[in-house]
């Protein structure tokens, strides 16, 4: 009996340890160990804070994730996704407000972060976007003949115009959660281009593939760590010049339904281009930036959404 109890105890500890690793340390999206609330002092919004402030801010986010509505920092985009209430909050705005709270935020970061989330929950402002994972409507499975996957594909297509001179700055759309993000960058500064050139030089010449086995071998080969570090530095530097638009699928879908009868022969992505450009131009609910846009960024975003071929 004693042996059985010992074995059961070991199993309980093992299962508990696995659960801690899977849910708190392992990033379920990347499938790898990744502590999501670590201090980096890396991305522009993080540099708003001192190392001590960022440590406290991350502790506050972790406390909110553990005890409140749950959250996940999308670091590169500078966005905090809050699970309940469902919303996206600009990390640029959050860190500025956290720093403005002074020593009180460091002394009680859990309270400070909860207060910031509560502020965002009071109403959509610049840097705050509400989303709804039931964005199609209760019991609705298609919009204009499109399921959620095809609608999301159309959204992604609508965000990438043809023939507009700009620097690619990324984009993302989540058909399950009901939101999209669109990076906006007019042009890389010259020093950023040089950083990318230096990184690619470390990667060496492009491989000469003879067959599929060569491709497989190259894919399986570990990347040069010096190249990865140099490329990451270039990505971080580039991010300083990127602004990000956030769109709510629910509001886009409502506008799409209204616009569709007036554009009966247009492709869905063209209708969405018109809808998204209108939402941006008229400052309509369901569309916001992670930080105040420059005139160049605003005009580029309109061009990207308005020009399709």
Image (cartoon, rainbow, N blue to C red):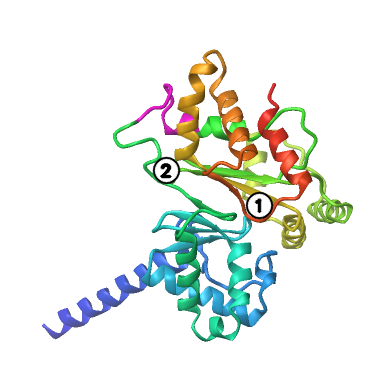
Is the residue marked by circle 2 packed among few (<14), some (14-19), or many (20+) residues within 10 Å?
A: few
- Residue 67 is left or right of residue 82, and the answer is left
Q: Camera-side residue: 280 or 35?
A: 280
Q: In this view, does 126 lie above or below 297?
A: below
> What is the span of residues highlighted in magenta in the rendered image?
141-151
Q: For the N terminus, which image quadrant?
A: bottom left
The quadrant where residue 51 appears: bottom right
Q: Position of residue 302 (x, y in %)?
A: 69, 36
Q: In this view, does 190 lie above or below 104?
A: above
Q: Is residue 27 visible?
A: no
Q: Which mark is residue 205?
A: none
Q: Position of residue 78 (x, y in %)?
A: 61, 59
Report the residue marked by disc 2.
176
Q: Residue 221 carries which label?
A: 1
Which badge, 2 or 1, comes first in the chain's sequence?
A: 2
The residue depicted at 41 percent of the width and 64 percent of the height is 70
Predominant SS along the magenta part: loop
Q: Camera-side residue: 32 or 288?
A: 288
Q: Camera-side residue: 154 or 28?
A: 154
Is the residue marked by circle 1 packed among few (<14), some (14-19), or many (20+) residues within 10 Å?
A: few
Q: In this view, does 145 lie above or below 111?
A: above
Q: How far apart are marks 2 and 1 (CA)?
A: 34 Å
Q: Where is residue 75 in the image (x, y as percent from the top left)?
A: 60, 61
Q: In this view, does 232 lie above or below 50?
A: above
The residue depicted at 77 percent of the width and 32 percent of the height is 164
Q: Position of residue 148 (x, y in %)?
A: 43, 33
> Is residue 148 shown in magenta?
yes
Give the mark count.
2
The quadrant where residue 154 appears: top right
């Amino acid at each position: 009996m004693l042996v059985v109890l010992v074995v059961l105890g070991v199993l309980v500890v093992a299962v508990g340890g696995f659960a801690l690793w899977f849910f708190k340390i392992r990033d379920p999206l990347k499938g790898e160990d990744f502590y999501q609330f670590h201090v980096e002092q890396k991305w522009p919004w993080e540099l708003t804070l001192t190392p001590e402030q960022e440590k406290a801010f991350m502790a506050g986010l972790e406390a909110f994730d553990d005890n409140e509505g749950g959250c996940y920092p999308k670091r590169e985009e500078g966005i905090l996704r809050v699970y309940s209430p469902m919303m996206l909050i600009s990390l640029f705005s959050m860190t500025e407000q956290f720093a403005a709270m002074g020593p009180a935020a460091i002394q009680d970061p859990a309270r400070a972060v909860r207060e910031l989330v509560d502020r965002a929950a009071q109403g959509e402002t610049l840097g705050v976007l509400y989303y709804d994972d039931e964005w199609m409507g209760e019991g609705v499975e298609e919009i204009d003949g499109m399921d959620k996957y095809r609608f999301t594909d159309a959204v992604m297509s609508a965000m990438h115009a043809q023939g507009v001179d700009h620097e690619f700055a990324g984009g993302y759309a989540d058909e399950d959660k009901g939101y999209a993000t669109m990076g906006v960058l007019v042009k890389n500064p010259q020093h950023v281009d040089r950083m990318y050139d230096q990184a690619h030089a470390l990667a060496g010449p492009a491989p000469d593939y003879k067959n599929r086995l060569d491709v497989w071998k190259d894919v399986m080969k570990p990347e040069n760590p010096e190249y990865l570090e140099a490329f990451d530095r270039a990505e971080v530097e580039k991010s300083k010049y990127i602004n990000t638009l956030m769109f709510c699928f629910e509001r886009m879908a409502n506008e799409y339904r209204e616009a569709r009868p007036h554009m009966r022969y247009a492709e869905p992505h063209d209708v969405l281009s018109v809808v998204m450009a209108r939402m941006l131009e008229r400052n309509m609910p369901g569309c916001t930036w992670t930080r105040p846009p420059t005139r160049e960024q605003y005009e580029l975003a309109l061009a990207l959404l308005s020009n399709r071929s």
